[in-house]
Image (cartoon, rainbow, N blue to C red):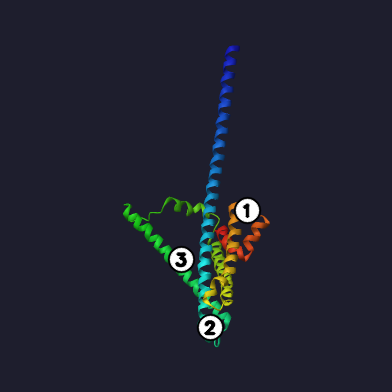
Amino acid sequence: SDADMKIINSVNSISYWSTEDTENESVGNDDDVIKNTEKDFSNSKYNIMYALAMIVMFTLAFGGERIAMSIITEKSSKVMEYLMTSVKPMAIVVGKILSNLLIIISQAVLILISLILSFLINGFISGENGKISIPSYVKNILDKGNFAGTNIGTFIIAFLILIGGFIFYGLIAALAGAAVSKIEEMSEGVKMYTILLIIGAYIALFVLMQGSYKDNSTLSYMVMLFPVTSVFLAPGAMI
């Protein structure tokens, strides 16, 4: 009858609308999951780049000061004059830079070993049967998803950029130390090195905080390629 047909059509229309609403909700939930995943990845990438930039800045600050101090000390004690009779000045500077670079790499390895031992000891104390107990925020940073687009080649290039950046700033620190003849004048000689270091680090941090490194803009390319700023941002962006 007509009444039965109306009831059937009503039921079919309700089923259609409920199915469509369910599909829309499912699509909306998938979009939310994708957005949350992209946001988590972006935050983790930002944390990695920011932490690496700060580590590089402090490493260059202490390493450059050590190089300048070494040259100033040898100049004030007349040791440099005896060395220059048989060794070229550039060879002395390169030797000091490479020796300080080796010291920094050794310190980084020792810090990494002590960090792993601390996680292992924490695992024993917390009763995890000797397993390495890594804090949750460290796990989030070291998650494989944060390094999905990286390989051995990108890690090697990032490491070479760090080495090149240290050599570049080491040469500037050596020139700053060579411009001073007395230890009392060390602060004046290292001042220009410190200013240049701060300018490079602040420009890199500005680009990082603004999120400009994500865009293929002229500013991001300039910061990545300019020697003064590339050491702070390029390694983290590649990793």
Residue 158 figure quarter: bottom right
Q: Around disc 2, counting alpha carbons within 10 Å, would you say few (fewer than 14), some (14 to 19), or many (20 or more)?
A: some
Q: What amino acid is labelled 3 in the image?
A: Ala
Q: Which quadrant holds the C terminus? A: bottom right
Of 193 and 20, the residue lying toward us = 193
Label whose residue precedes the other's in the sequence (2 or 1): 2
Of 132 and 83, the residue lying toward us = 83
Q: Nearer the viewer, mark 2 or mark 3?
A: 2
Q: Determine the secondary structure under disc 2.
A: helix
Label whose residue precedes the other's in the sequence (1 or 3): 3
The answer to whether residue 108 shows anywhere in this view is yes
Residue pointed to by mark 1:
212
- Name the spot of residue 7 as percent of width and height, x first: 57, 16
Of 57 and 232, the residue lying toward us = 57
Instruction: Quote the CA–CA distance across marks 2 and 3.
Output: 30 Å
The residue furthest right is: 218
- Name the spot of residue 13 as percent of width and height, x first: 59, 22
What is the number of the mark on residue 224? none
Label whose residue precedes the other's in the sequence (2 or 3): 2
Q: Residue at x 63, y 60 (%)?
A: 223
Residue pointed to by mark 2:
80
Q: What amino acid is labelled 2 in the image?
A: Met
Residue pointed to by mark 3:
108
- Is residue 44 positioned above or below 179 on the image? above
- Is residue 90 positioned above or below 210 on the image? below
Q: Nearer the viewer, mark 2 or mark 1?
A: 2
Q: Determine the secondary structure under disc 3.
A: helix
Residue 10 figure quarter: top right
- Name the spot of residue 146 as percent of width and height, x first: 52, 53
Q: What amino acid is labelled 1 in the image?
A: Ser
Instruction: Quote the CA–CA distance across marks 1 and 3.
Output: 30 Å
Q: Which quadrant holds the N terminus? A: top right
